Image (spheres, rainbow, N blue to C red):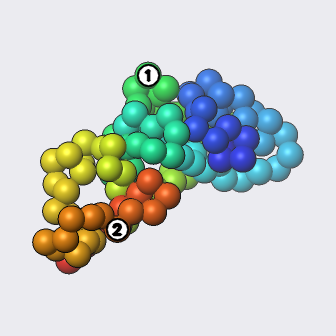
Amino acid sequence: TWEAMYFDVTHERVMELAREAVKVGVELLVLDDGWFGNRQDATSSLGDWYEDRRKFPSGMAGLSKDVNSLGLKFGLWVEPEMISVDSNLYKEHPEWCLNQQGRGFRCEGRNQLVLDFSR
């Protein structure tokens, strides 16, 4: 969905794309960025891996069921190693990010931090 919609994904828009995809022989539809947290742009919500019910009222279960009913497989994009400063996860656990502990700055790039999986 990325090149077709960027962050502007909704259940109905994804289904419109899925219906067109079936016509040209696509077998797998992957829902990319924008489906989770409060993700409207690249500055927030990485790490908040819960569906945005405003965009997807029936959640991922409902969307995947509808996509599958067209004969398509359904995939879901995640970036589990990254976290946004503007996210609930960061607010609750800033210490989970890779960082120079004890230094007064974050190792931030592209509005993202890297999660430290060793913690």
- Element assignment for label 1: loop
Residue farthest to the right?
Answer: 24
Which of the two marks, 2 or 1, is nearer to us in this view? 2
- 103 sits left or right of 29 in the view: left
- Residue position marked by numbered label 2 in the rendering: 107
Report whether residue 58 is seen.
Answer: no
Classify the position of the N terminus by image quarter.
top right
Q: Quick check: 117 above or below 56?
A: below
Pointer 2: residues within 10 angstroms few (<14), some, or many (20+)? few
Task: Give the total number of marks visible in the rendering.
Answer: 2
Nearer to me, 35 or 114: 114
Upstream in sequence: badge 2 or badge 1: 1
Q: Tell me what residue is drawn at x 35 percent, y 56 percent.
A: 83
Query: Mark 2 and mark 1: span between their CA atoms?
Result: 32 Å
Amino acid type of disc 2?
Cys
Residue depicted at x 57% and y 48%: 32
Provide the residue designation for mark 1.
Answer: 54
**In terms of secondary structure, where does tag 2 sit?**
loop
